[in-house]
């Protein structure tokens, strides 16, 4: 007598919630990236800067036009050898300034004269790309740099490879920092990495983004 076969259970298709389908934004660090949102400077690059640089330098393809690939902010905290909490404060401040979680940087060797041991946290760092990169650049140019006392523009010294590093003496130029709550004035280095092959082209690109170079005349 043949036994009855159990009813075959159809495989259930993976469920995708309506919330996930209709989700128009996703959280990235401390910011929300909205679907379809394009930062002002990214739009400026696509609509205006590409065309202008192509005309000025004779590029025949959009792929030849230099672009800003990333912005790296480094903050060394030398006093951290005597007070470990300073580097934690710096990390928190840099996270607040950029809207992206800053990471700690560590010493690579022992230096007895500075009471420095290998593996000790001595600074903090953030690398910005895409949306956050353009948003940070816009805030830097429009708000932060003009807050520097007696500001007369930034130097034009590039590294020979199409990249530019800007030194900032005090973190209080950024409006995200509450002056009443800072424990120590600290500087930082902001490096703009571009795809340009020549410093001249990188200079033209960053100038079009609004970086206020000293000797530039419109």
Image (tube, helix red, strand yellow):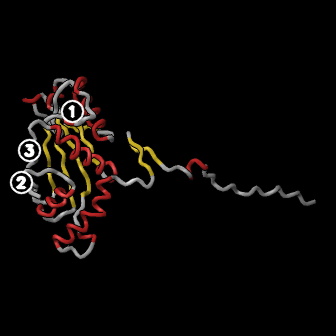
The residue that mark 2 highlights is: 215
Q: Earlier in the sequence, mark 3 or mark 1?
A: 1
Query: Which structural element holds mark 2?
Result: loop
Q: Where is residue 106 shown, x and y percent of the image?
A: 22, 37
| Cβ atoms under marks 2 and 1 closer than 8 Å | no
From the viewer's perspective, is 146 left or right of 48? left
Q: Residue furthest front?
A: 218
Pointer 1 residue = 120
* Residue in the picture at 15% in, 28% down: 79
The answer to whether residue 153 is above or below residue 46 is above
Identity of the residue drawn at 58% across and 47% down: 19
- Mark 1 lies on a secondary structure that is loop
Looking at the picture, tell me which residue is in the foreground, 12 or 60. Answer: 60
- Residue at mark 2 to residue at mark 1: CA–CA distance: 41 Å
User: Could you tell me which residue is drawn at 11 percent across and 36 percent down?
Assistant: 149
Question: In the rendered picture of this protein, how many numbered marks are placed on residues?
Answer: 3
Residue pictured at 63% horizontal, 54% vertical: 14
Residue at far right of view: 1
On-image quarter of the C terminus:
bottom left
For the residues labelled 3 and 1, say whether their Cβ atoms are less than 8 Å apart.
Answer: no
Residue annotated with mark 3: 152
Q: Earlier in the sequence, mark 2 or mark 3?
A: 3
Residue 136: horizontal and vertical position, in percent? 27, 46
Nearer to me, 76 or 177: 177
Horizontal relation, residue 70 to residue 146: left or right: right
Residue 68's spot in the image, x, y percent?
Answer: 24, 57
């Amino acid at each position: 007598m043949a036994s009855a076969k159990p009813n075959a259970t159809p495989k259930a298709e993976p469920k995708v919630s309506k919330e996930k389908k209709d989700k128009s934004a996703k959280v990235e660090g401390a910011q929300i990236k909205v679907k379809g949102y394009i930062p002002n400077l990214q739009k400026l690059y696509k609509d205006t800067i590409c065309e202008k640089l192509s005309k000025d330098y004779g590029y025949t393809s959009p792929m030849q036009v230099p672009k800003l690939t990333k912005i790296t902010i480094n903050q060394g905290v030398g006093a951290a050898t005597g007070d470990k909490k300073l580097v934690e404060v710096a990390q928190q401040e840099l996270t607040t300034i950029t809207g992206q979680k800053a990471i700690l940087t560590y010493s690579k060797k022992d230096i007895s004269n500075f009471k420095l041991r290998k593996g000790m946290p001595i600074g903090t760092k953030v690398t910005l790309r895409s949306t956050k990169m353009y948003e940070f650049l816009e805030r830097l140019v429009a708000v932060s740099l003009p807050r520097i006392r007696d500001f007369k523009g930034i130097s034009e010294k590039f590294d020979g490879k199409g990249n530019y590093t800007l030194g900032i003496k005090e973190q209080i130029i950024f409006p995200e920092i509450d002056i009443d709550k800072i424990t120590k004035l600290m500087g930082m280095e902001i490096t703009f990495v571009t795809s340009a092959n020549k410093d001249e082209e990188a200079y033209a690109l960053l100038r079009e983004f609004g970086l206020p170079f000293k000797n530039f005349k419109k």
